[in-house]
Image: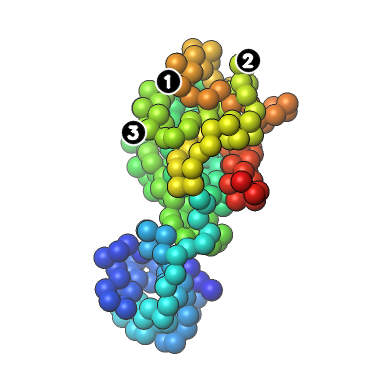
Amino acid sequence: MPRFFVTSNQIVGDTVTITGEDAHHISRALRCAVGDALTVCDMSRTEYECELTDFLPDCVKARIVTSHPAHTEPPVHITLYQALPKGDKLDTVIQKAVECGVCRIVPFESERCVVRAKPDSEQRKTERRRRIACEAAKQCGRGALPEVMETVSFGEMLRLAESSDAVFFCYEGDGTLPIGTLLAKNNIPFGGSIALVIGSEGGFSLQEARTAAEKGFYMTGLGPRILRTETAPLFALACISCHFELSDL
């Protein structure tokens, strides 16, 4: 069934108003008709099963038949902090991370990043990344639309991440503990928050790792094999999902 995301002001009583590209997609690309069913998700993890009622020049309207809490959202709020990789790798990371249950994605610049954010193109790139996240959320049946932020500095990433209940700083150097061990020992509650920090192709410098450790971040290992920057976040997210969603805690 087609799935679309709306804001709370688009829901009035039992009527949902869908505008913009989504309305065009419903009427033109999907060729829907009055009476057809679709699923609408708000930004608060609630799903609405709806029936289309009106096709207007600037919008599509639907009547809410039933509503229920979304069952596809992870039990913890995961933010992925991804150092800027080369090429279009970030697009792939965003798409797959959304499928793996991430709730927010924050690109950042680290010392060893080859790519740097450019002020004149950052807004355009962020809008494209948000569209990628939206399409991935629709495809995999998410009940909430993950947020994609503009690129921040390493220092700003540290400031944002430290507000989470646990911060896993993925590092290839000495002094790390396996992510499974850290998940088991930290007793992160359901509804809690996790920050996952991933480096670029060159990883993190020793000084960056020391700064993160001084902040209280957990130096996290992802196993004996060297993972690419686009593989590491997906591997770590799968480990988190296994711990919280696929095992008996």
Image coords of residue 10 (percent x, y): 29, 68
Q: Is residue 17 above or below residue 128?
A: below
Q: Looking at the picture, which amino acid does disc 3 mark?
A: Pro
Q: Is residue 210 above or below residue 140?
A: above
Image coords of residue 210 (percent x, y): 49, 14
Question: Is residue 101 something that shows in the picture?
Answer: yes
Image coords of residue 53 (percent x, y): 37, 85
Whole-number angstrom distance, CA of label 3 to CA of label 2:
36 Å
Whole-number angstrom distance, CA of label 3 to CA of label 1:
29 Å
Q: Which mark is residue 167?
A: none
Q: Residues within 10 Å of mark 2 (few under 14, many from 20)?
A: few
Which mark is first along the chain, 2 or 3? 3
Q: Which residue does the image show at 43% across and 55% down from the upper left?
A: 145
Task: Name which quarter of the figure residue 14 lies in.
Answer: bottom left
Q: Which mark is residue 174?
A: 2
Which of the colour schemes (rainbow, by chain, secondary structure, one colour) is used?
rainbow
Residue placed farthest to the bottom in the image? 35
Q: Looking at the picture, which amino acid does disc 2 mark?
A: Asp
Q: Looking at the picture, which amino acid does disc 1 mark?
A: Lys
Q: Is residue 49 above or below residue 243?
A: below
Badge 1 element = loop
Q: Which residue is mark 3?
A: 119
Discs 3/2, front: 2
Q: Which residue does the image show at 33% across and 74% down from the upper left?
A: 16
Image coords of residue 176 (percent x, y): 61, 21
**Viewer-proximal residue among 1 and 131:** 1
Q: Which mark is residue 215?
A: 1
Q: Which residue does the image show at 48% across and 52% down from the upper left?
A: 133
Q: Residues within 10 Å of mark 3 (few under 14, many from 20)?
A: few
Badge 2 element = loop
**Viewer-proximal residue among 129 and 106:** 106
